[in-house]
Amino acid sequence: MNEQQVRELLGGFTDPILHKTLAETNGVLEVSIKEEKEHVSVKVAIAKLGTPEQLTFQMDIVNELKEAGFKTVGIRFAELDASVLEQFRGTATRSEAQDLLSPINKTQFISIASGKGGVGKSTVSVNLAVALARLGKKVGLIDADIYGFSVPDMMGVQDMPRVENDRIFPVERFGVKMISMGFFVENNAPVVWRGPMLGKVLDQFFRDVEWGDLDYLLLDLPPGTGDVALDIHQMLPESYEIVVTTPHPTAAFVAARAGAMAIKTQHHILGVVENMSWFQSEVSGEKEYVFGKGGGTKLASELRTQLLGQIPLGQPDIIEADFAPSVYARNHSTGQLYLEMAQNVIDQLAKEEK
């Protein structure tokens, strides 16, 4: 085969993420035939690198070229330019556009992370999701803390997801669509699965849930930098991350590791939230800094990002008719802080898009 024939052969392959042929994406970048036509070297651009689909795609190309007569095949990959992906957004089918993990999907991912448990990461996730919905955004929430799931209880959810034709329809409350391992475990039983099984569950949360059109999908990550958090970082085409800490210096020190992992996996730090910043006494009206001061500011400085907000230590008002043990009412002082934070997030993401 000559170079042009190799290009035509490769052009018939379909990008494993974008579902368009390499001819359509101009994804065949280089072809070089050497050593009396026994070795071919090619460079191919695809929508996303480092996925399991890429490995299968690579093997298919190598096998096809060997069947065409080459004894050895060298293949390199590059990522398609953002302008090419933007071009295909307008021509995508509904199913392609709604594939959350496709680079042409417009949903913005916001991962909520922490270095350790107990700093209020899930509380921040739930209330930020509700605040974004209150500001008119279409919001989804994945409770990705598989071992420590808590979102359904925090949101006061009594319903279960609906399953139709192998599709899972998420539960919606306060304008937020949500899915959690908690929906699939009986009687609050502990999860004793190992890593590979958990990875399949997370993949289902992305691919088998009927999310519909979303502006934002929030992910309540497990604390720390373990396998599940790493899997999610590698799964997403692009993600913004909010790191939650308390004012205590040690909590901020530990949280820095979660931020560092986001940076290493080429995700973007959107900001830091300092939770339990103070306790306001109902008796004196004074703020009491029970966990100290400065942790959030220090962490934001270390991660070279902004402090998105400071949330006081407290408990939402219990309203029996609309019970949700961790969701602050819109007119609550802390609920107002979450609305301000949500607007800040919206503004920051709008700047990132430009």
Image (tube, rainbow, N blue to C red):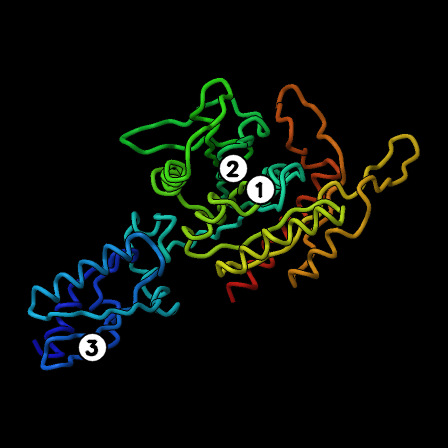
- Examine the rendered structure and indicate whether residue 351 appears above or below residue 331: below
Q: Is residue 194 left or right of residue 112?
A: left
Which residue is depicted at the point 53% across and 28% down?
Answer: 152
Checking the image for residue 145, the label placed there is 2
- Is disc 3 surrounded by few (<14), some (14 to 19) or many (20+) residues within 10 Å? some
Q: Residue at x 58, y 46 (%)?
A: 113
The residue carrying pointer 2 sits among few (fewer than 14), some (14 to 19) or many (20 or more) residues within 10 Å by Cα, namely: many
Q: Viewer-proximal residue, 122 or 52? A: 52
- Label 1: how many Cα within 10 Å (few below 14, some 14–19, many 20+): many
Mark 2 to mark 1 CA distance (whole Å):
8 Å
Q: Position of residue 127 (x, y in %)?
A: 62, 39
Mark 2 and mark 1 residues within 8 Å of each other at the beta carbon: yes
Q: Determine which quarter of the picture holds residue 344.
A: bottom right
Q: Which numbered disc, 2 or 1, marks the residue that appears first in the sequence?
A: 2
Q: Which mark is residue 31?
A: 3
Question: Element type at marker 2?
Answer: loop
Residue placed farthest to the right in the image?
A: 284
Of the residues shown, which amino acid type is indicated by label 1?
Pro
Q: Position of residue 37 (x, y in %)?
A: 10, 79
Q: Real-space Cα distance between discs 2 and 3?
A: 45 Å
Q: What distance separates the C-alpha of mark 3 from that of mark 1?
A: 45 Å
Above or below for 315 versus 15: above
Q: Residue at x 63, y 42 (%)?
A: 116
Residue name at image x 54 percent, y 55 percent: 261
Q: Could you tell which of marks 2 and 3 lies nearer the N-terminus?
A: 3
The residue that label 1 is drawn on is 223
- Given residues 306 and 66, the one toward you in this image is 66
Residue 344: assigned label: none
